[in-house]
Image (cartoon, grey):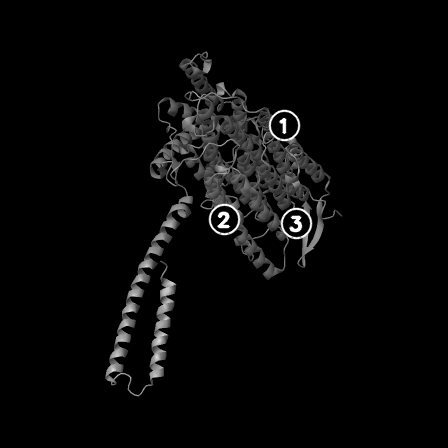
């Protein structure tokens, strides 16, 4: 292909973006120390509750879905022999 | 007093029905002008009940404008206008016409003051919307459309039965808040539950929506399910079971969405999950919760149609929306990619977007009522939303590995429609007060507190970190060509298989009966012949006539059984 390589196509760029994300996460975790919390539940006040909950919920969802795929995944032709047609309208 | 004919719904429905009489350009102009005119009419309607009419001796209130009805009618109009811009390039009169009739029916149902008017419009939404699936004009779409229509018609019959039971017992047709111990109300709740895609009643949605046309799916995503949300908010606010139904709805679709390959089907699961937040809010039933549900429906219609529009543009340009076939499209469709990301951050409820200022109301309402488990479920589901709609949709279509596919950017009318939706997503997020002013109840609510913003960012960015962590290690499930079984398997595979087994069993039974009865008849006839030859024993003193009658009777029974059982 002749098209110029885009900035986003470089692996270093992806690594940089992920590092920025991790840094933002670290900053947000520390932010827990600097504001007064008014949650409705006691557990909302635990240090890093939303951080841990977000990460663990996400990892659980993805892994549970992998198990679900093994149970309910079927070939595309399961209900009919031909996959859906191309559509333009 | 407003007359019954001064109804925005009638303008859209009659306009839609007359649309095929126009030429291509006037038709497209009218597809925009009619929702605009209807919106003006809606804004001119006075508050309160009006448009009284009599049908078969029943007094109907065809127009009721209050804050709850108005906000739904308003967003239906805004969405109809945006989707008309999105469909501007279309030359298909069927889709233009059915979109207008469908929009009119939905508007008419939310403005209905009584159950019969609501039912009539409700049925019309089902009938008019199926053409958006059939407009794909393939055999597959025909079958999907039939399944969709059967489910919708079934829900209509349930609703009608509930209304009849209520009317018979109480003589009341008003569409107001009801409780589950009132006659017919449970049946109505189940009917609305079908349209709202309650768990196990949901799968018509994921079956049908992704199979409609490019514009058809956008239009379908707007009306039917939100009409059901409106009906729940009107009739069943504060019904406790809805808290748990809503929580379950937010939960189960996220797992299906993670492993689904068709990105419009991913969005359909995501739609189901978003409905769960609204249903939960309605179940909580406090002023803040109902406000949250209505506001979330408003915001959701915009960002969900934006996402469906973006995936529709990909389907239009590339010919597929399968994640396994896509990737790297940001090079060809940078504007579509950018607008899709706006939809994704909105549905994920990042601060400064519409999802944040509406969803947080429902979570706050759950918190205020100390509903810790529903609150935790909604929080968990919010992490799921980030995966399927926040990351999966834009990432696997526009980024991820480059599929090598190159195409044109989306047509300018599609970009304009997506741009308008994206503008509203950000606009509502940055300045939510005009939306809050439209809500049913006067409740002071401030979404932008330090706690709200920080905790929401913590949840979302740590979930995003979860994605980065899993994806870079190769632990994220790959996008593969496949389909996933869901509850539609019951009526697409299990039920036909069971019926097949039952029919084969009946066939065998029939054959056995025929054999048995045939044998009996032959033996009887032989016996009769024997007796007649020897002239003794069995017939004794009976006449030949009565013997003939018995034999004729036996033969008649044999014939009838053969006819009933002999299918072949």
Please tell me whether mark 1 or mark 2 is closer to you in this view: 2
Percent position of residue B49, x then y: 70, 48
Percent position of residue B476, x then y: 37, 27
Say which element carries label 3: loop
In this figure, what is the number of numbered marks? 3
The 10 Å Cα crowd at callout 3, few under 14, some 14 to 19, many 20 or more, is many
**Tag 2 subunit:** B
Percent position of residue B400, x then y: 42, 22
Q: Which residue is mark 2?
A: B150
Residue B131: in sight, yes or no? yes
Depth check, front residue: B563 or A61: B563
Please tell me whether mark 3 or mark 1 is closer to you in this view: 3
Q: Which residue is mark 1?
A: B431
Depth check, front residue: B259 or B276: B259
Most extreme residue toward the front is B533
Percent position of residue B385, x then y: 47, 32
Rendered position, A48 above or below B243: above
Residue B240: in sight, yes or no? no
Say which element carries label 1: loop
Q: Which residue is mark 3?
A: B113
**Tag 1 subunit:** B
């Amino acid at each position: 292909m002749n098209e110029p390589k885009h900035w986003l196509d470089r692996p270093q760029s992806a690594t940089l973006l992920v590092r920025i994300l991790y840094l933002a996460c670290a900053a947000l975790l520390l932010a827990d120390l600097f504001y007064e919390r008014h949650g409705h539940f006691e557990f909302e006040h635990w240090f890093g509750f939303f951080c841990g909950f977000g990460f663990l919920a996400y990892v659980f969802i993805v892994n549970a879905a992998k198990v679900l795929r093994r149970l309910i995944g079927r070939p595309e032709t399961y209900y009919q022999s031909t996959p859906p047609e191309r559509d333009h309208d | 007093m407003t007359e019954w004919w001064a109804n925005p719904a009638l303008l859209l429905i009659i306009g839609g029905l007359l649309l095929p009489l126009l030429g291509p350009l006037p038709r497209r102009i009218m597809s925009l002008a009619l929702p605009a005119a209807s919106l003006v009419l809606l804004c001119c309607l006075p508050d309160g009940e009006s448009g009284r009419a009599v049908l078969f001796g029943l007094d109907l209130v065809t127009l009721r404008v209050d804050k709850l009805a108005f906000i739904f009618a308003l967003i239906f109009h805004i969405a109809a206008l945006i989707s008309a811009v999105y469909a501007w390039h279309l030359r298909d009169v069927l889709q233009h016409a059915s979109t207008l009739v469908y929009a009119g029916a939905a508007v008419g149902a939310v403005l209905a003051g009584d159950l019969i008017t609501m039912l009539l419009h409700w049925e019309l939404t089902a009938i008019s919307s199926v053409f958006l699936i059939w407009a794909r004009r393939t055999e597959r779409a025909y079958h999907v459309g039939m399944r969709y229509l059967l489910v919708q018609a079934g829900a209509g019959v349930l609703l009608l039965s509930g209304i009849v039971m209520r009317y018979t017992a109480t003589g009341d047709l008003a569409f107001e808040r009801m409780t589950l111990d009132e006659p017919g109300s449970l049946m109505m709740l189940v009917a609305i539950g079908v349209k709202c895609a309650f768990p196990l009643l949901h799968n018509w949605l994921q079956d049908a929506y992704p199979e409609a046309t490019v514009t058809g799916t956008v239009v379908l995503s707007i009306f039917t399910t939100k009409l059901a949300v409106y009906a729940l908010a009107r009739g069943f606010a504060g019904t406790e079971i809805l808290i748990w139904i809503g929580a379950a709805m937010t939960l189960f679709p996220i797992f299906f969405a993670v492993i689904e390959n068709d990105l419009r089907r991913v969005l359909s699961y995501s739609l189901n999950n978003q409905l769960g937040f609204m249903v939960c809010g309605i179940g909580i039933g406090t002023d803040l919760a109902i406000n949250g549900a209505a506001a979330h429906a408003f915001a959701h219609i915009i960002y969900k149609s934006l996402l469906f529009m973006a995936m529709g543009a990909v389907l239009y340009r590339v010919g597929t929306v399968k994640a396994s076939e896509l990737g790297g499209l940001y090079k060809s469709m940078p504007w579509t990619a950018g607008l899709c990301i706006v939809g994704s951050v909105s549905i994920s409820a990042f601060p400064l977007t519409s999802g944040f200022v509406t969803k947080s109301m429902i979570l706050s309402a759950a918190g205020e009522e100390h509903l810790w488990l529903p609150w935790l479920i909604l929080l968990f589901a919010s992490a799921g939303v980030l995966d399927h709609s926040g990351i999966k949709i834009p990432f696997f279509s526009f980024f991820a590995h480059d599929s090598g596919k190159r195409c044109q950017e989306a047509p300018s009318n599609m970009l304009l429609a997506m741009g308008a939706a994206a503008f509203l997503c950000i606009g509502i997020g940055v300045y939510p007060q005009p939306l809050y002013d439209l809500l049913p109840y006067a409740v002071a609510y401030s979404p932008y507190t330090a706690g709200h913003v920080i905790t929401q960012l913590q949840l979302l960015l740590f979930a995003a970190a979860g994605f980065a962590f899993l994806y870079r290690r190769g632990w994220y499930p790959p996008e593969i060509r496949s389909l996933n079984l869901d509850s539609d398997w019951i009526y697409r595979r299990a039920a036909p298989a069971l019926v097949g087994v039952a029919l084969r069993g009946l066939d065998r039974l029939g054959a056995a009966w025929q054999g048995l009865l045939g044998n009996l008849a032959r033996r009887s006839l032989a016996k009769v012949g024997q007796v007649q030859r020897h002239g003794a024993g069995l017939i004794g003193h009976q006449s030949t006539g009565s013997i003939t009658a018995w034999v004729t009777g036996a033969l008649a029974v044999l014939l009838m059984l053969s006819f009933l059982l002999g299918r072949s």
